[in-house]
Structure formats: C-alpha cells, structure tokens
Amino acid sequence: MNLVELAQRIKQLRVQQSLTLEEIAQSSGLTRSWLSKVENFRVTPSLPALGRIAHSLGVSIATLVEGLDQKPKLVCVRSDERLLVERDRPNSTIAYESLAHQRSRRAMDPFILTVPPGVARKEALAHEGEEFLMVLSGKVDFEYGEQHLKLKNGDCLYFDADEKHRLINPYKREAKVLCVFQGSDGT
C-alpha cells in the first residue's frame, strides 16, 4: 500500500468535512501530533488505528484503501496534472508537486520541491528508506546529521533518510529540487 496516497486520502476526507486534526484526535482517541504525521506520510497507521481514523471520518477502511493495490504498468502525468501536496505545514514552507500520484502502488515517490528563500523547514527530520535529490534550479544548503553541504543547479545527493536532514535556502531566489523517496521496504 502506498503511504503517500493513503495520507492524501485521509487528509482530503478530513478537509472535505471541515474537520480539524484535533476533532479527529478526540473522536478517534489518537493524538493530534500522530495524526499529523500520518497525514504528512511520516508514519503508517496500524490496521486498528486506521479503523479508528476511518470511523472518525465516517467511512470504512475499505473506502480508505480502495484501489491502493492497483498498479498500472504505465502512468503519464502531464506537467499541468501534477498534484500539489501539503507536507508538514506549518513546520515547512516547501511546496511538493507529486509527479506520480496517478499510480497508487509505487516503489518510489518522486516530487518537484519548490524551496522558497529562508529556512524552509524548522527542524531536520528523519524517516525510513532512501532519498535522492537533484537541484534543478537555484541553490540550497543541505543539512544531514552534522554535515552541511552547499548545492547548486545540477548537484545530486543519494542518502539513507534515517538520519535527520533538511533543505535550507539562505539565498534570495527560490530553488527547484527533484526529490525521490523510497521506503525501506521498497514502497
């Protein structure tokens, strides 16, 4: 099952019903911070937790996971069909454009990140799996544990994502970065 697609469905249903994370937390017995991590595809809910979320949203688990096991051999996402994904608001001002959202089951999650000038993410975070970054335009700084790298157009990184990391743009112009996530289990 694809964590990004599941997270997007949960958040979309919550927003469509004009419910806050706090309201879902109260009705499900789960914490607001944990639900935020689910919606920002930082954690995958267990089946019992998914059931509690579904109940709070007034839908079945089947509705939340419907079609997530389908895997078309080829998906074409045109430039005007990219899906803007909010991730980690208000802790991050980076805009994520999903490049493969039309394929539910995928081993990778490619995004174009628009990194505005300034500190785009308040704190460095770690997650499971591996990650690939390529600066498409502009410049960014990258923190990886205790390491600090300056990256410019064309520079690439491939790294284990279980170390705390973040992008920072201390420069005057926004930067565009290709980012590809891969979970530790290939999903």
Image: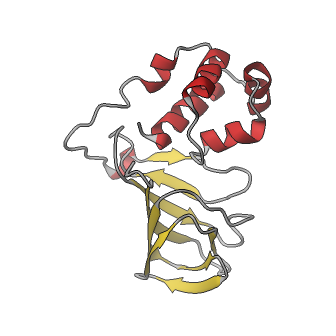
Seen at 40% across and 23% down, the residue is: 66
In which image quadrant can residue 62 be found? top left
The picture places residue 179, in percent across and down from the top left corner, at: 45, 64
Instruction: State the scheme by which the image is colored.
Output: secondary structure
Judge whether 54 appears above or below 92 on screen.
above
Q: How many marks?
A: 0
Viewer-nearest residue: 104 or 111 = 104
Judge whether 71 appears above or below 49 on screen.
below
Viewer-nearest residue: 164 or 39 = 164
The picture places residue 163, in percent across and down from the top left corner, at: 60, 69
Judge whether 153 appears above or below 35 on screen.
below
Q: Is residue 83 left or right of residue 124?
A: left
Seen at 53% across and 65% down, the residue is: 161
Seen at 69% across and 36% down, the residue is: 35
Q: Is residue 27 left or right of residue 38?
A: right
In which image quadrant can residue 173 be found? bottom right
Q: Quadrant of the N terminus?
A: top left
Viewer-nearest residue: 41 or 100 = 41
In which image quadrant can residue 93 be found? bottom right
Seen at 37% across and 52% down, the residue is: 186
The picture places residue 129, in percent across and down from the top left corner, at: 47, 59
Residue extending furthest toward the left: 73
